[in-house]
Every structure is written in C-alpha cells, then in structure tokens.
C-alpha cells in the first residue's frame, strides 16, 4: 500500500515527519514524500524515501496559482494512486483534500499544526479570507 505525505516545505517533512515516515515504511507502506523544492529533499532521498518536488507558493493567496496547485495535485494523485494521503499545513490540507476527493478512492488524513497567522492575525486581508478558509476546511 502507498501513502503520500504532503507538506509545505521539505524542511518540515524532514524535521517533524521523518519518524512517522520511517515507522510507516517499517510497517510495510510505500511512503512518498511531497513538498516544494528545497535543500532538505536530498536528505529525504538519502534516507531512502522517494521525494517529489512539487513547486507551489506557500505564502501567497493567488487564485490562479492555487488552481494550478489543485490541478497538479489531481494529476499527481491519479499518477501515484496512493491508498492514503496525509496533508500538513493549511494550503496542503485544503488543496490536497480537494484533489483527493476529486480523484476518489483515496483516504485522507489532515493535520494542521497550530492556528497559523490566518487565525491569529487581525489584519484586513486575513479577516476577509478567514471565512473562505473555514468553508474550504469543511469541504476538505
């Protein structure tokens, strides 16, 4: 069985999810790690994991870029055919879950660590976006 772990940085996967990936592999799962390109991807592959560098912007909200990410994820999930996808961080949870739902037959596990600035910042932009994110979480 194949599981795909998707986070917004390779650094995050290496520092916070490597033990999980190793345990899953020890239990017989084929583990595929996915994140934007970064210097920790090499470390993940040196540990024997398959790492897919999926370019996307983590700090911006651009509907065209986000639709592009959703399209890339749908293609990736169709190609990889994972049994389970595990998403970390807001953007990965939302778009990864929507892609998994679109593809079908994919189990989803979502984990957002902390609230993130979207739920703690009081700026106008975040206040306006917050209801949309809540709605997208419900879809995810």
Image (tube, grey):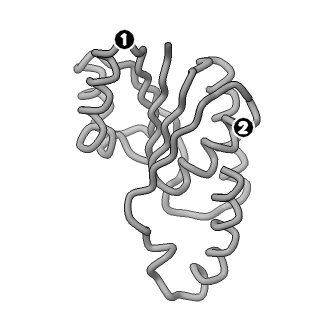
Residue closer to the observer: 137 or 44: 137
Residue 75: quadrant of the picture: top right
Among the 4 quarters of the image, the one containing residue 13 = top left
Q: Which mark is residue 28?
A: 1
Q: Is residue 132 left or right of residue 60?
A: right
Residue neighbourhood size for the residue with mark 2, other residues' Cα within 10 Å, grouped as few (<14), some (14–19), many (≥20):
some
Q: SS at mark 2?
A: helix
Q: Determine the residue positioned at 68% across, 58% down.
A: 138
Position in image of residue 65 (x %, y %): 66, 52
- Residue 18 lies left or right of residue 85; in this view the side is left
| Residue drawn at 30 percent across, 21 percent down | 45
Residue 110 in the image: state x and y as whole percent.
Answer: 51, 46
- Residue shown at 39%/19% (left/top)? 50
**Residue positioned 32% across, 28% down in the render:** 21
Label 1: few (<14), some (14–19) or many (≥20) C-alpha neighbours in 10 Å: few
Q: Is residue 119 above or below residue 101?
A: below
| Tally of numbered discs | 2
Rounded to the nearest angstrom, the CA distance separating label 1 from label 2 is 25 Å
Viewer-nearest residue: 30 or 67: 30
x and y, in percent, of residue 133 in the image: 64, 66
Whole-percent x and y of residue 43?
24, 28
Residue on which disc 2 sits = 101
Q: Secondary structure at mark 1?
A: loop
- Does residue 113 appear to the left or right of 132 in the view shown? left
- Dot 1 or dot 2, earlier in sequence: 1
Image position of 29 with respect to 112: above or below = above
């Amino acid at each position: 069985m194949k599981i795909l772990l998707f986070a917004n940085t390779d650094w995050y996967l290496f520092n916070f999810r490597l033990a999980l990936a190793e345990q899953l592999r020890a239990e017989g799962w084929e583990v595929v790690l996915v994140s934007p390109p970064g210097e920790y991807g090499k470390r993940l592959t040196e540990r024997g994991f398959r790492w897919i560098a999926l370019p996307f912007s983590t700090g911006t909200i651009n509907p065209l870029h986000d639709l592009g990410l959703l399209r890339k994820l749908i293609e990736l999930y169709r190609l990889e055919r994972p049994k389970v996808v595990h998403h970390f961080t807001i953007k990965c949870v939302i778009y990864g879950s929507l892609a998994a739902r679109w593809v079908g037959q994919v189990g989803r596990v979502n984990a957002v660590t902390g609230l993130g600035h979207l739920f703690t910042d009081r700026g106008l932009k975040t206040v306006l976006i917050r209801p949309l994110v809540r709605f997208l979480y419900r879809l995810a």
